[in-house]
Amino acid sequence: MIRQAHKKYKDDLALLHFDAHADLRVDYLGQINSHASVIRRCGEFLGWRNIFQFGIRSGTKDEFEWGKAHTNFYPFEIVPSLVEALPKIDKRPIYITIDIDVLDPAYACGTGTPEPGGCSPGELIKALGILRNLNVIGMDVVEVSPIYDSSDRTPILAAKIVREGILSFLLDLKSWYSDFINIATQRTEPTLGIRYFISNI
Ligand SMILES: [Mn+2]
């Protein structure tokens, strides 16, 4: 998806990467295309200065040095870092990739490489809110592994994040709002879903 976005938007595209891990390894256990080398591969066609990394708190010394030297590298905090980066991205098409492990394992333990010391769901949703009025052209949420989470809180949280993305970036809220009002007025009682949607606008 990121490659397709780059074909369309070329070097104007900004990639926002939220993750506990830098994912900047040249390869991982001999694999060039690995979950630990995704952003390294992206940088090769995106251009390093078009990558913005937030929440990073795990990686090799080489990855951290590469990140600091080449990408816009903001370890640990996400909201203050995003605010700092805004002048560089606010007029550009933006693709957001969220690794669920950017969140603390207390909230999202259902993932392959959990990393304590992460952000809260509120902070991530606030970050999406900051981006709401910008030109976000795509978003993904990756690394959700429900099998590691017997409480199901991780997939529920992932669904919430995707929902926030859809509401914030995909829908024309005004037209949807009027559509939902039209639907609601044709019913004797709006459904819970419709009420919930309206209450979140
Ligand atoms: Mn990760």
Image (cartoon, rainbow, N blue to C red):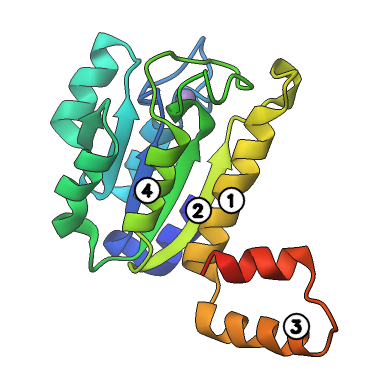
Calculate the distance from the C-alpha at mark 2 to the C-alpha at mark 4.
16 Å
Percent coordinates x, y for residue 29 in the rendering: 51, 9
Sequence-wise first label, 3 or 2: 2
User: Mark 4 against mark 3, which lies toward the viewer?
Assistant: 3
Q: Does the residue labelled 1 lie within 8 Å of ligand 1?
A: no
Q: Kindly indicate whether the residue at mark 2 contacts the one at mark 3 (C-beta within 8 angstroms).
A: no
Foreground residue among 37 and 88 = 88
The residue at the point 18 percent across, 19 percent down is 65
Please rate how many residues cluster around mark 4, counting C-alpha atoms within 10 Å: few if below 14, some from 14 to 19, many from 20. Answer: some
**First reached walking from the N terminus: tag 1 or tag 4:** 4
Q: Name the residue under label 3.
A: 184
Q: Are marks 2 and 1 in contact (CB under 8 Å)?
A: yes
Residue type pointed to by label 4: Lys
| In the image: residue 161, left or right of residue 52 | right
Residue 141 is situated, as x and y percent measured from the top left of the image, at 56, 42
Provide the secondary structure element on which disc 3 rests: helix
Please provide percent x and percent y for residue 154.
Answer: 63, 29
Q: How crowded is mark 1: few (under 14 residues within 10 Å), some or many (20 or more)?
A: some
Give the mark nearest the N terminus, 2 or 4. Answer: 4
Dot 2 surroundings within 10 Å: few (below 14), some, or many (20 or more)? some
Q: Mark 4 points at which residue?
A: 126
Ranked by sequence position, the earlier of labels 1 and 3 is 1
Q: Position of residue 139 (x, y in %)?
A: 50, 53
Q: Name the residue under label 2.
A: 139
Mark 2: which amino acid? Met
Q: Mark 1 points at which residue?
A: 162
Q: Is mark 4 on a helix, strand or loop?
A: helix
Between residue 156 and residue 59, name the one nearer to us: 156
Q: Is disc 3 surrounded by few (<14), some (14 to 19) or many (20+) residues within 10 Å?
A: some
